Image (cartoon, helix red, strand yellow):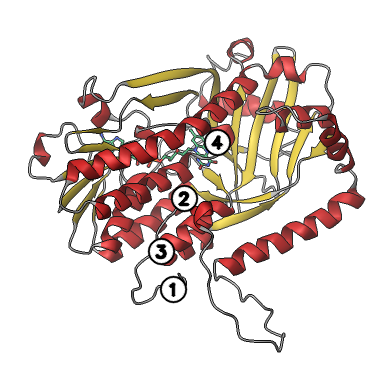
Amino acid sequence: MKIVCIGGGPAGLYFAISAKLRDPRRDITVLDRNPRGATYGWGVVYWDDMLDLLYVNDPVSARAVHRISTLWKDQQVRVGHEVAHLGGYGFAAQRAAFLKALTDRATELGVTVHDDRPVRDLDEFADADLIVAADGAGSLTRELGGDHFGTRVDTGANPYIWLGTDTVFDSFVFAFEQTPAGWIWFHSYPSSGSVSTCIVECTEKTWRSLGLDRLDEDDGLRLLEKIFERPLEGGALISQARGEPARWLRFKQVTNRTWRHGNVVLIGDAAHTTHFTIGSGTRLAIIDAVELVRSLDDFPEDLSRALFDFDERARPNLQGIQGVARASMNWYEHADDHLDGRNAVETAYAMANRNSTRPAALNRRFRLEQLPVIRGPQSVLNTVHRWHMAARRGQVPLVPAWHPGPPSPGPRPPRPADTLGVRPAPAEAGTVRPET
Ligand SMILES: Cc1cc2nc3c(=O)[nH]c(=O)nc-3n(C[C@H](O)[C@H](O)[C@H](O)COP(=O)(O)OP(=O)(O)OC[C@H]3O[C@@H](n4cnc5c(N)ncnc54)[C@H](O)[C@@H]3O)c2cc1C
């Protein structure tokens, strides 16, 4: 089967890896418009559930992604000089390093990856059996399909800019600062040993009143550094990651009535986007990739049946999370109303509950969790949980090395419910095959 994959982001590359791994006879080419190593954005966060999925599907690339990831512990909400704690932990990876790890693995498996190769129309792929449109939220391939996909793009109201900072946080930090023009905030997390990702956001009104719509790149960054001097602890903001300088953008929420048309199928952001405040787009792109391969494997002789199956199974799963993402985006678009008159603990509680209404008892528990004497043991519990998850994936022994007990039963796959029924990778040299 000859497959052309337009777009070498997480969706396109991970599809290519999974498809080639399961059937090496597949002839797969990935085309990306950017030169090798250049990409937009900084780091992306993810949680244990994505690692579970990666380890079950392809332990080799999972280990590579894990190696370049940074662990963050706790989530802090800083309002002015006050700090509240939301707890938890997660991981983050620089987008460029993440894509390099996937590109290396795809190439190693025999996928052809062409960079600096913008696609402008589909005529040149007339001999392809399948065209995978993984070309992101602004997908040209989707546009070329005219009305067939039933695309809807809603634009968010808040301007945001995806930056880096040389302040290396060890937690996920949400910092809110009040200016005479209104509230402005950032979402920041460590994404390598030397930088943190820093997404700055505010309402349109505040953005214009601060003059951020008119200032050039340098003056805009200097103004933001001044506003965020306290939470950035005097650190600098950095605009350019490994591509174009960052620009102020508005989030595009993409939905499609169908993800397939003829032999073209949409995956990742080309098919759906979820607001960055729920940090899920990369994981969802990877799930699409895995699910599409599953449908192709289930119907090897009938491509249209396979694409129908993928569309029917994967698309409905997105509706719930897109609803959550919309609610989250909406909360931030009205952040000034939520923030006015609230201290850090109240803001953190409101923020944590932006998608639900938790009973008052939970509010009391949340207040207790602000005490260091409670947070200490919780942090230990998180460490134990992290260790348990790593053991389940086979990354660490299930019993400590000094324990004289029985030998480790080896890696265990996560329960199917945790990985949306992802099938383990076929055994091959250099990979660890989880028990089934
Ligand atoms: C500010 C921000 C923060 C985010 N934070 C997180 C986070 O913390 N966690 C998370 O999971 N997700 C996050 N996301 C979402 C995540 O970045 C996307 O969901 C994810 O990258 C989607 O992967 P993709 O492969 O579908 O698309 P993309 O990553 O956009 O890749 C598309 C690729 O297609 C290429 N391309 C486009 N057009 C063409 C063409 N005509 N020809 C050839 N190539 C083309 C592009 O160069 C690009 O490499 C964030 C998004 C934003 C905007």
Q: Nearer the viewer, residue 202 or 424?
A: 424
Q: Is residue 197 above or below residue 105?
A: above
Residue 9 seen in the current view = no
> If the picture is divided into quarters, which one holds ligand 1?
top left
Q: Nearer the viewer, residue 327 or 409?
A: 409
Q: Callout 1, which amino acid?
A: Val
In the rendered image, residue 316, in percent from the top left (x then y), is placed at 42, 34
The earlier-in-sequence mark between 1 and 2 is 2
Q: Which mark is residue 163?
A: 4
Looking at the rendered image, the disc whose residue lies closer to the viewer, 1 or 2, is 2
| Residue at the (33%, 57%) spot, across then down | 18
Measure the C-alpha gap from mark 3 to mark 1: 10 Å
- Residue position marked by numbered label 3 in the rendering: 424
Q: Callout 2, which amino acid?
A: Leu
In the rendered image, residue 355, in percent from the top left (x then y), is placed at 65, 28
Measure the C-alpha gap from mark 4 to mark 3: 36 Å
Measure the C-alpha gap from mark 3 to mark 2: 12 Å
Judge left or right: residue 60 versus residue 180: left
Q: Which mark is residue 420?
A: 2
